[in-house]
């Protein structure tokens, strides 16, 4: 694809090449039905076959019939589901992983080329610690969720209070940005600021040097000084007990 991008960069079209033709639209066939399709991209330096995606995650998304997975090259895949509920699970749950490497799911869009599909967001639960009990509620979760990405959901009881010692917030995370290790909360006059560390449930492989999901230290373009310590570590990752959350081995 790099060669194609170079070819297009300074391309000047002739009058014949500028003339457009209409494809699809109102004609029979159109742009195809994508209601049961989605795209997937594995963030890995190694190439993975479509069969691995089918066998690893297909039966999680659609236990009865599995999925069809077509290899589009560069670790990109076209996923076809047999049920709308299976596609919804793939898009809304996760994060999904193969050997701890993130498989990013994006909805099918028949109007875009594969190069235009954005594989930059994953849903993930974060766990916020050290919050005062009076702030362990949905309103706080919405503010924190939108600070980390986009708020999606919160784990709370019927009385609107958090269900546990930490505040669990599900967010739509932009993986192009470094992971945040916590958040500073202003508790008001007389109390001051409080640092509240976070952990990410089922966090995929990420770089301890720059904090970005999708590569590891040895392939990072950012280099540490001889005596400099990596600012990130495995403490950001939290694996919930199987007894409460079920499974987890598929990730």
Image: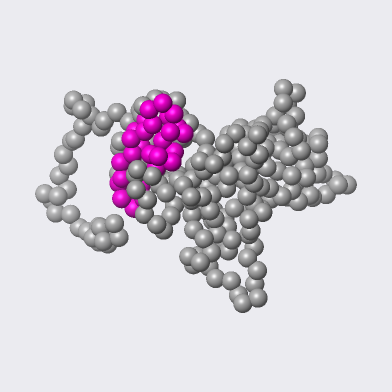
Q: Is residue 130 above or below residue 228?
A: above
Q: Position of residue 32 (x, y in %)?
A: 26, 30
User: Which residue appears farthest toward the left when viewing the image?
Assistant: 16
Taking the magenta stretch, the answer to whether it contains residue 66 is yes
Horizontal arrangement in the rendering, residue 185 relative to residue 100 (left or right): right
Quadrant of image for the N terminus: bottom left
Q: Which of the 4 quarters of the picture holds residue 3?
A: bottom left
Residue displayed at 18% across by 54% down = 13
Q: Is residue 146 visible?
A: no
Residue displayed at 70% across by 32% down = 139
Q: Is residue 134 above or below residue 182?
A: above
Q: Position of residue 110 (x, y in %)?
A: 30, 36
Taking the magenta stretch, the answer to whether it contains residue 45 is no
Q: Position of residue 238 (x, y in %)?
A: 64, 46
Q: Is residue 114 above or below residue 34?
A: below
Q: Which residues are magenta?
A: 53-81
Residue displayed at 41% across by 35% down = 58
Q: Is residue 187 visible?
A: yes
Horizontal arrangement in the rendering, residue 5 relative to residue 40 (left or right): left
Q: Position of residue 127 (x, y in %)?
A: 68, 42
Residue 219 or residue 33, whichever sits in front: 219
Q: Which of the 4 quarters of the picture holds residue 209?
A: bottom right
Residue displayed at 57% across by 48% down = 203
Residue 110 or residue 37, whichever sits in front: 37
Horizontal arrangement in the rendering, residue 219 relative to residue 21 (left or right): right
């Amino acid at each position: 694809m790099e060669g194609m991008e170079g070819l297009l960069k300074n391309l000047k079209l002739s009058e014949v090449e500028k003339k457009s033709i209409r494809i699809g639209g109102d004609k029979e066939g159109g742009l195809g039905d994508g209601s049961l399709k989605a795209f997937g991209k594995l963030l890995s330096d190694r190439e993975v076959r479509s069969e691995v995606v089918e066998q690893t995650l297909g039966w999680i998304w659609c236990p009865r019939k599995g999925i069809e997975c077509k290899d589009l090259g560069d670790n990109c895949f076209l996923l076809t589901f047999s049920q709308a509920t299976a596609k919804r699970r793939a898009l809304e749950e996760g994060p999904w992983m193969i050997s701890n490497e993130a498989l990013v799911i994006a909805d099918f869009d028949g109007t875009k080329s594969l190069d235009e599909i954005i594989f930059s967001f994953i849903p993930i639960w974060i766990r916020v610690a050290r919050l005062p009990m009076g702030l362990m509620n949905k309103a706080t979760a919405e503010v924190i969720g939108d600070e980390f990405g986009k708020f999606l959901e919160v784990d709370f009881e019927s009385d609107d209070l958090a269900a546990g010692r930490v505040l669990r917030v599900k967010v739509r995370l932009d993986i192009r940005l470094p992971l945040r290790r916590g958040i500073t909360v202003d508790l008001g006059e007389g109390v001051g600021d409080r640092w509240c560390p976070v952990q990410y449930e089922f966090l995929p492989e990420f770089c301890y040097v720059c904090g970005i999901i999708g590569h590891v230290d040895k392939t990072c373009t950012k280099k540490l000084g001889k005596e400099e310590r990596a600012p990130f570590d495995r403490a950001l990752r939290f694996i919930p007990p199987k007894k409460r959350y079920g499974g987890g081995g598929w990730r």
